[in-house]
Amino acid sequence: MNTAPTFAVVGHPNKGKSSVVATLSQNDAIAIALEPGTTRHRHQYPLTVDGRVLYTLVDTPGFQRPRRVLEWLRAHSLSASDRAETVAAFVQQHRDDPRFHDECELLSPLTEGAGIIYVVDGSVPYSAEHEAEMTILRWTGQPSLALINSIGGDDYSDTWQAALGQFFQVVRKFDAVRATFEQHLTLLNAFGQLEPAWEAPLREAVGHLSARRQQQQQHAAALIATALVEMMAWREQKTLTESQLAESSRDALIEQLRNRWFDHQRRREQRLRTAVEQLYQHHHLQRQETELHWHSGDDLFSEDSRQLWGVSRGYLTTAGFGAGAIGGAGLDALTLGTSLGTGALVGGLIGAAGSYFYGDKLQFPALRLGPLGRGLKTASFGPVQDRQFGYVVLGRAVHHWFEVSNRNHAGRDQLRLTGTDRHWLEQLDRPSRQSIQRVFERCRKQQTLDSAAVQNLTAAIGAAMSIYSNWRLNPP
Ligand SMILES: Nc1nc2c(ncn2[C@@H]2O[C@H](COP(=O)(O)OP(=O)(O)OP(=O)(O)O)[C@@H](O)[C@H]2O)c(=O)[nH]1
Ligand SMILES: [Mg+2]
């Protein structure tokens, strides 16, 4: 079996070393901050897939006294052949010397065999003060790669490129905070070229990471499918005795169940968000998103949500339902049945007017009492009858998945989810549309779902995710 390589990320203080470590180890728990000196000690971050370490990154503090170190090295080296040993001797002798604490921390992993990832800021001009530290790194004799990470807006990468080329085997531009997954893989391949012993393990690492990314997408589709089915089919229920029913006002009962139903849907959507974030190892993500919300007083989504995420009549027609089928109640509100039998669903017939899609003002059907069973009644609210509900939830979920799956683990800014144009889903192929719509209809009518229907739904969501990615990565 191949041994997994280790890379130490080194450089000046505050140039994005920890950001590079976070990106390449896909770990969003690493401290990254504006203040220089954020990283005080070396720390190893392995990247594991299925319990197997593919490679390890070592985060280190920045150089503090490189010229003094170089002076010492020069004074103690007899010839070019003993340079690596001289660096090791320096670390050995200065381990407890507070003046060289940071240098010892960053040089130790190199003396133990780690490869070098040297990080500079390409948005500030090159200066010769870096030459001492670059010389020290060259003395270690380890395989080396330099990354030009631009923190500010200016670009001095050409002069950096020329200077770094004198000291490092490979020089690349790499945006520590915005690098994509593909750029991450490209870097691993470049490292494989540096050191023959690393070629095979890094090629395997690229293979494992790519395979995991595909599995993550499938897993995310399954998470979204499960949440959608639960949300579409959700009913809020309350069992009442006949006398309780007689005492409670019908409006208050509806209000109570309706609020519970909305709360449940919001919480369920949040749970889906967290599950997708965990899947992509974003454990500390700050997210801002408008909650699923409805106009108070009626049960339809706000016009905004519809505009952003709803589908058109044309879409629904091709999903296997005539345009005439689109009209319908928002929520099929309150049903009353005995606690022993299933609730008799009260179909609400709603008049249509005004809204962009079908604009019904929801009216609750008259309360209907089922036959008495031991004096108990079950009042239930839901499932949702608004056919756009599922599309709004789906659109929001796919958008969130896209942002999370493409988010770099060095990002510490808030993830703000705002809407996008709704027409992307309309590129979905007809069989996928039908798979989605079929499940929505079965949930709406409280019919049971077989596993094949859920699998088809998952596959259709997978197709929707690909369309959305394509549309975002290659805008028309
Ligand atoms: N805009 C932008 N900011 C970056 C980039 N890379 C790093 N930063 C910011 O620069 C600051 C320093 O980043 P760190 O990754 O903590 O740098 P470091 O080299 O580990 O710093 P020390 O541990 O203090 O030596 C942080 O505020 C980062 O968000 C980048 O590519 N673009
Ligand atoms: Mg750091």
Image (cartoon, rainbow, N blue to C red):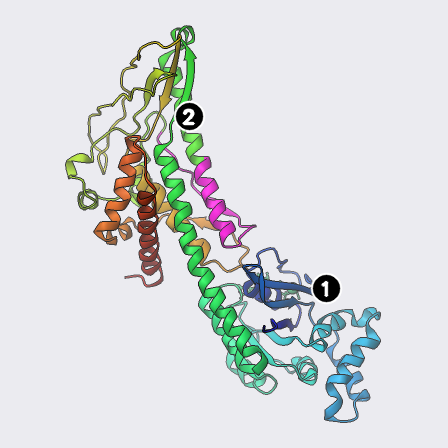
Amino acid type for the residue under numbered disc 2: Asn
When the figure is inspected, residue 119 is found, relative to residue 231, above or below; the finding is below
| Figure quarter occupied by ligand 1 | bottom right
Q: Quadrant of the N terminus?
A: bottom right
Q: Is residue 30 magenta?
A: no
The dot on residue 15 is none
Amino acid type for the residue under numbered disc 1: His
Q: Position of residue 192 (x, y in %)?
A: 53, 78
Q: Nearer the viewer, residue 290 or 114?
A: 114
Disc 1 marks which residue? 41
The answer to whether residue 313 is left or right of residue 75 is: left
Q: Is mark 1 within 8 Å of ligand 2?
A: no
Disc 2 marks which residue? 259
In what element is the residue under mark 2? helix
Q: Position of residue 214 (x, y in %)?
A: 42, 60
Q: Would you say the residues marked 2 and 1 are in contact, meaning their CB atoms lie under 8 Å apart?
A: no
